[in-house]
Amino acid sequence: MTRWLCAALLTLSTTAHPAELTVNDPQVAEASAAALVFMSRMKPQLKQALQSGPPAQALAVCAEVAPQIAAELSAETGWSVKRVSLRPRNPQAAADAWETEQLEAFDAAVAAGGNPGWAAAEVNGEVRFLAPQRVGGACLLCHGESIDADTAAALKRLYPEDRAIGYQPGQVRGAISLSTARRDPPVSP
């Protein structure tokens, strides 16, 4: 986890906003760590669900457990934590304007053969942070082009407006989005 955090802190996607935040901003480090915690709590539960049953059963982890983890992490950290996408499974996970701009930049980075890194900026008095979620092998079971019939039926039932399918390995499926009001660092006496 420490290696991932160091790699994340060394890679910064640029933003078109004049209030771009850098790796030296303490809130960027906080947000990056919170995004890592989200992923470290989510991944083992999803992996266990996939190992114990068909992909259709694992949908409950994304539908129920992920929002619970986001709510718990929001309460623990003071950040608003959520998942967003350009092609959301749940319409409530649609990216806003800033997130859309960053997700499009992530997609462009991947298309050019690069690493999307992360994005951070101060937007309208809020610190915004976005950590991309790329498609891995297990993701393809529910987000790929070839989804089994049971999973497709479960997706249609749970997410009638689902747009989160047809992905290829390595593409950016979405991101962990964090935001909070700007907090000035403590001043030494």
Image (tube, rainbow, N blue to C red):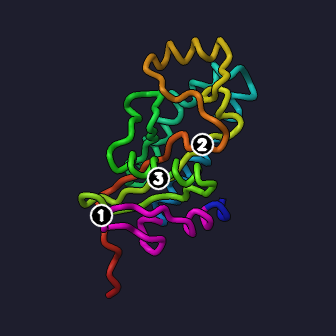
Disc number at residue 171? Answer: 2
User: Magenta region, mostly helix, strand or loop?
Assistant: loop
Q: Mark 1 points at which residue?
A: 182
**Residue 103 percent coordinates (x, y):** 46, 47
At x 43%, y 52%, the residue is 102
Callout 2: SS: loop
**Residue 106 percent coordinates (x, y):** 51, 51
Does the magenta segment cover residue 14?
yes
Disc number at residue 105? Answer: 3
Q: Is residue 168 left or right of residue 122?
A: right
Please report the bounds of the magenta region as a residue range. 5-28
Callout 3: SS: helix
Does the magenta segment cover residue 26?
yes
Q: Distance between the residues labelled 1 and 3?
A: 24 Å
Looking at the rendered structure, the number of numbered marks drawn on it comes to 3
The answer to which image quadrant residue 150 occupies is: top right
Q: Which amino acid does label 3 sit on?
A: Ala
At x 56%, y 52%, the residue is 37
